[in-house]
Image: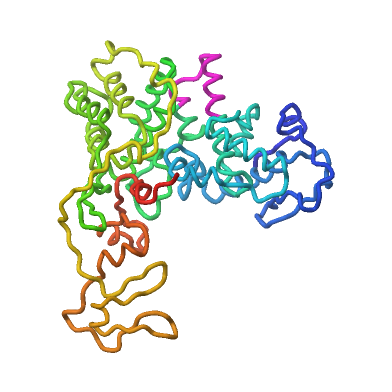
Amino acid sequence: MVTINVDTSLANNRLGSTVVRDLSPASVLPLRDPIGAPAVVEADADNTLSILARQLSDAANHDARMRQADPGNNLSNPLDAISDERYFADKAQHDAEVPDTHVLELLERAKQATAFANGLANNPFKGLAVDQLTLIARDESGTFTVNERRAAWQEVRLNEQRVSASSGSATGRELMISRLFLGHEPAVAEGTLTSSNMAQSSYDFLTRDDRSLLSDMYAYAQEQGADLAYVDMLAYDLGNYRHHDNGRQLLSGNNGYNQEGRRVTFNFKEHDVAAASRILNGSAIDSTRLEQGFLRHVLNPDFGALSNMGSIAFLEQMVLKFSSAGATQALLGREFATYTPISINDNMVVTVAEEVTLTFDEPVLINTDGIWTITEKGKAAGYTMDPATGKPRRAVAPSVDDRQPRSVVGEAVTGPLKTRSLIDTLAGTPDQSTPRWRWPGYLLKLMKNPKP
């Protein structure tokens, strides 16, 4: 249980200085009791208790329950939703989130957090203690919006950099543990992706050698004045590679077709193609501490293009620095001083073939937004519409010739194309130890459903 001392922790903080007084019944702040049941605290129950202090107390109770239920974060990592790749995958949704409350202070703070996330305002949690920031970042109960949680998480990371710059006491390993594991380094997770560990943080699967190398990268990036988020993204790609059996459970994204049967392929942007070629064909790859298998996997467009959220240019600098040629490596340029996220749609080249190379059988049934339609082929096969249920039925048993699998075209009109493969489907058994296969970086879904 994390104890929040309202008088000492918040007395000198702008957020904690707001006293709850004379709120109307519509402005009552919802909290949760220690066992999670909804409770309502009237605004005048204690006029010295700030809104934020009550939220922090609620978050502390929630965090204690979560740590007790899942000590190693094996089922879910509360930081996943606010970490770089997963956060930006649903950023439009996060920016639109509004607290379910009438309390003006809460609405304004959430609005400021969203503005901060878009570089238009200061961090609303600036000045809070690290333990309070950590509670906010880890809280998944809905007390704080996702943008508020991310703002708190970013303030934690910024505080670490400030302390390191002023005291020089933070080592690369301390930075690695703080940024990837929020201060508590777990043991190296064993095994590969299964249904029982698919929600576990990919960082947990980083090997001891990986963590040692990343520690040195953090120290070097900090020394050079580079944004440490570049190392964060590289660590995510490496951890994801380890989690999926060193990439063996990831399927190529370059074997798909669109609804017209045209082949669709993905590649890096031109400047990334050049950087990838320099890495794969240069001499440094033979002596670099970064595993060659990882480099060949992540720089292969079949796998890397669909999950290219980081920087291949920064990866090239790390390959060179941590190789036998590292002593002569030039300093990191100013282009790495600030990490700027790029959406997956803007970070790859999509090519659609002109020739149709995949044909589909005409479907017998089509379902559009829950409404069934019987095609001419379906009518000929004996399908009719049940007037009572609005669903198709067949009066006669199908012949051998009519027993055809449902057409991909019929599937396509019901919603976005699915990225699930045959292997993926076969792997989805009730046995939780069964390995699971995935398309490279589930981000193909984003390409099918781009967000503004």
Say which residue appears at 33% left-offset and 40% top-offset.
307
Q: In the current view of this chain or complex, which residue is farthest to the top? A: 328
Measuring 25% from the left and 26% from the top, which residue is drawn there? 275
Name the outermost residue toward the bottom.
396
> Which residue range is magenta in the image?
156-175
Quadrant location, the N terminus = top right
Q: Residue at x 52, y 28 (%)?
A: 157
Q: Position of residue 314 (x, y in %)?
A: 33, 25
Q: How many marks?
A: 0
Residue 443, position in %: x, y?
36, 46
Residue 392 locus on image (x, y percent): 35, 80
**Depth check, front residue: 49 or 346:** 346
At a point 54% along the width and 25% down the height, the residue shown is: 158
Tell me which secondary structure the magenta stretch mostly adopts: helix
Indicate left or right for 413 with 360 as reference.
Answer: right
Q: Which residue occupies the foreground of this view, 29 or 45?
A: 29
Task: Give x and y (percent) for residue 342.
Answer: 39, 34
- Is 141 a magenta residue? no
Nearer to me, 74 or 269 = 269
Indicate whether 440 appears above or below 422: above
